[in-house]
Amino acid sequence: MIRVLLADDHSLVRAGLRRIVEESGDMEVVAEASDGREAIRKTHETLPDVAVIDISMPELDGLEVIAQLQTHNPKLPLLVLTMHEEHQYVIRAIEAGAMGYITKQSAPEQLVKAIRKVHGGARFISEDAAESLALRVAKGSHGQSILDSLSMRELQVLRRLALGHTNREIASAYSISIKTVDTYRFRLLKKLNLRNNAELSRFAIQNRLIEP
């Protein structure tokens, strides 16, 4: 049996994913997590064969979870599951160490196949995510969007600011100083040519970095 950890902050989504996984016949869910810190803790406690990680989670987002798990358990296959289809997340997830990337829309048809594939040591990218990745490669450096210029940490801080998190909350989440968060915020406003957090939120929604 392939032992699977599911990390998503929506209980109904986790219930649906659990049903899909356990109906496969060769998998079992050994742990569930509703936020990033819990995902890391339960991964260490249960030692799953595959971890399915959502990008948008409280405490720590999926990209940070992937980065930390890769540091402590680099052989663990990580599969990203998300509502986000923008190529920024495909690229960032792979750069962080994910072996697979599928959207929640494709999960009913592809989740089991994706888990089996990454468990076997191969990569898996769903068709809709692969199209975004192919478009990114085809455009090359001349076709990069403004989001491509952001570092992973800048992207993470942007999402949290857009969601209304305070600088103190962001500093605590990523174990950095409030002054460092201020620096990231200043860089974001300058790079994106925006004036305040309200405009950061509108930008994030327009670019599908967060759900409205």
Image (tube, helix red, strand yellow):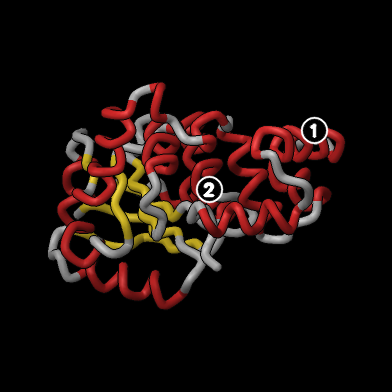
The residue at the far top in this view is 141
Can you say which quadrant of the picture contains the N terminus?
Answer: bottom left
Q: Going by the image, does 208 lie left or right of 125?
A: right
Q: Secondary structure at mark 2?
A: helix
Front residue of 138 and 84: 138
Measuring from the top left, give residue 7's x and y in whole percent. 45, 58
Mark 2: which amino acid? Ile
Asked where in the image residue 35 lies, by quadrant, the reply is bottom right
Can you say which quadrant of the picture contains the C terminus?
Answer: bottom right
Question: Who's the residue at 31% across and 69% down the image?
Answer: 18
Q: CA distance from mark 1 to mark 2?
A: 27 Å
Measuring from the top left, give residue 120's x and y in whole percent. 17, 38
Provide the residue designation for mark 1. Answer: 183
Question: Who's the residue at 41% across and 55% down the image?
Answer: 84
Mark 1: which amino acid? Thr
Provide the residue designation for mark 2. Answer: 40
Q: Secondary structure at mark 1?
A: helix
Q: Going by the image, does 85 lie left or right of 190?
A: left
Measuring from the top left, give residue 185's x and y in whole percent. 76, 40
Question: Who's the residue at 39% across and 70% down the image?
Answer: 14
Residue 211's mark? none
Q: Is the C-beta separation of discs 1 and 2 under 8 Å?
A: no
Indicate whether 97 appears above or below 51.
above
Q: Is disc 2 surrounded by few (<14), some (14 to 19) or many (20+) residues within 10 Å?
A: many
Q: Earlier in the sequence, mark 1 or mark 2?
A: 2
Front residue of 93 and 84: 84
Q: Is disc 1 surrounded by few (<14), some (14 to 19) or many (20+) residues within 10 Å?
A: few
Measuring from the top left, give residue 203's x and y in whole percent. 60, 52
Q: Going by the image, does 53 lie left or right of 179?
A: left
Question: Who's the residue at 53% across and 57% down the image?
Answer: 206
Indicate whether 74 appears above or below 88.
above
The residue at the far bottom in this view is 12
